[in-house]
Amino acid sequence: MPFLILCIIIAMVVQLLVLFKLQEHHIKSRYISFFLMELFPLGGALYYSIKQPSVPYLGWEFSAAMCLWMAGAVLLGYMLAWGIYTLKSKK
């Protein structure tokens, strides 16, 4: 669980940096960053689902599920960053 919280925090900080530091002419990068952050956890889940490697503890299903949990944590961090950005820009 602490690892997932770390994933949320890292994704939120990265997205906040993207949202607050990019100039207006780089507006499309705000949305591309989500796909770049989700690429690794979803790629890992896809790998474990296709390859199904033999893992001596808890099997490959645990690894695929952990990758999906990480993808969910990244999504939550992304949404939190957009919420913070929206609240800050209204002021």
Image (cartoon, rainbow, N blue to C red):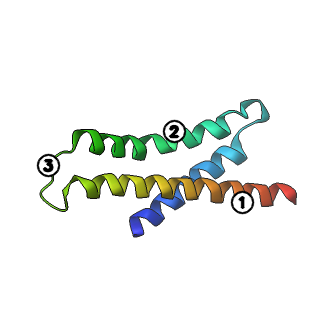
Check disc 2: other Cα within 10 Å, few if <14, some if 14-19, many if 20+: few
Q: Which residue is mark 3?
A: 54
Which residue position is annotated with label 2? Answer: 36
Q: Nearer the viewer, mark 1 or mark 3?
A: 3
Helix, strand, or loop for circle 2?
A: helix
Q: Quadrant of the N terminus?
A: bottom left
Please provide percent x and percent y for residue 15: 61, 49
Q: Residue 84's mark?
A: 1
Q: Earlier in the sequence, mark 2 or mark 3?
A: 2
Q: Secondary structure at mark 3?
A: loop
Comparing 54 with 19, the one in front is 54
Q: Residue at x 43, y 63 (%)?
A: 4
Residue ranking furthest to the bottom: 1
Q: Position of residue 63 (x, y in %)?
A: 28, 54
* Disc 1/disc 3 C-alpha distance (Å): 42 Å
Q: Which structural element holds mark 1?
A: helix
Query: Looking at the image, which residue is at 35% across and 46% down?
Result: 45
Label located before the other in sequence (1 or 2)? 2
Label 2 vs label 3, nearer the camera: 3
Outermost top residue: 25
Q: Which mark identifies residue 17? A: none
Mark 2 residue type: Leu
Disc 1 residue type? Ile
In this rendering, position of residue 64 left or right of residue 69: left
> At 12% across and 57% down in the image, what residue appears?
56
Q: Which residue is depicted at the point 55% across and 53% down?
A: 75
